[in-house]
Image (tube, grey):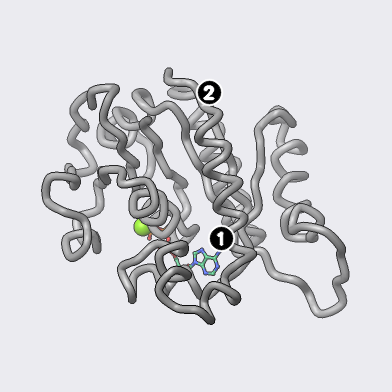
Amino acid sequence: MKITVYSAKGSAGKTPIATNIALDREYAIGTNERFHVFDSFIPDNRLLTVDLTESFPTIPDDIDIVFDLAGAISEHSHSITSALSQSDLVIIPIFNEVKSLNAGIGTINEVLKFNQNILVVSTKLQKQSNEHFTGDWRNSRDHQNIAAAIVQSGLSDKIPVLPLKFSKVFDAIFEKEMSIRQIMGAEPLAAYTYREIAKQFDEIYKHIDGVKHA
Ligand SMILES: Nc1ncnc2c1ncn2[C@@H]1O[C@H](COP(=O)(O)OP(=O)(O)OP(=O)(O)O)[C@@H](O)[C@H]1O
Ligand SMILES: [Mg+2]
């Protein structure tokens, strides 16, 4: 399985999503970020780095890899286009803030030129003080705004959107160099604190498992 996590917007949470997948599923990581954080916890033989303008090699189908990509798509961004066009799935994180929404919609349109299999992740979801919803975070205002923005921009309402709430665990992944599930296994209290975000990641894994190889 080859997965790209990409958004033209920085700080959307691409790296923690890619890292959590890599650690849980023992995927290799491909990155075009010069100052990445993976050296200390991803073994050399599972880490592939290129420059923005350099293509990733074609990865054999029996190797699982997640590409964590930064930068904008242009005619020179071969790292991004080579990862997008060989991936089975492209995950695009978007949060409910004007710049992220705009960049997210723009990113979906750009990605569609290279890959039609997109999963949007609505991320950093927070409950507003006057907000009450029951059930899961799909019912939150943040998530619904993101889903609505995609449809209103003329993009298909068939692009799936899965929710990830705001959680401090996204920083803990790098502090502890463990996936959310690994942190929960190591710390009894964390198993309680992070149960909801872990379940949301399980939905992402379920989606990944339903994806057929391109
Ligand atoms: N769902 C979330 N809840 C809380 N914090 C989050 C969430 N997702 C991401 N963050 C935090 O937002 C910050 C930005 O994430 P990060 O820089 O890794 O994103 P990125 O998309 O990889 O950005 P870049 O393009 O700069 O590489 C980090 O501190 C991260 O922990
Ligand atoms: Mg990053």
Question: Is residue 70 or residue 169 the one in the foreground?
Answer: 169
Using a 10 Å C-alpha cutoff, classify the residue at mark 2 as few (fewer than 14 neighbours), some (14 to 19) or many (20 or more). some
Q: Which residue is mark 1?
A: 198
Place of residue 96 in the rendered image (x, y in percent of width and height, measured from the top left): 66, 59
* Quadrant for the N terminus in the image: top left
Q: Which residue is mark 2?
A: 116
Q: Quadrant of residue 165?
A: bottom right
What amino acid is labelled 1 in the image? Ala
Above-or-below relation of 11 to 60: below
Marks 1 and 2 sit apart, C-alpha to C-alpha, by 27 Å
Marks 1 and 2, the one that precedes in the sequence:
2
Using a 10 Å C-alpha cutoff, classify the residue at mark 1 as few (fewer than 14 neighbours), some (14 to 19) or many (20 or more). some
For the question of whether residue 199 can be seen, the reply is yes
Residue for point 57% across, 70% down: 194
Residue for point 60% across, 75% down: 192
Q: Establish whether ligand 1 lies closer than 8 Å to the Cβ of label 2.
A: no
- Describe the element under mark 2 as helix, strand or loop: loop
177 to the left or right of 192: left
29 to the left or right of 104: left
What amino acid is labelled 2 in the image? Gln
For the question of whether residue 76 can be seen, the reply is no
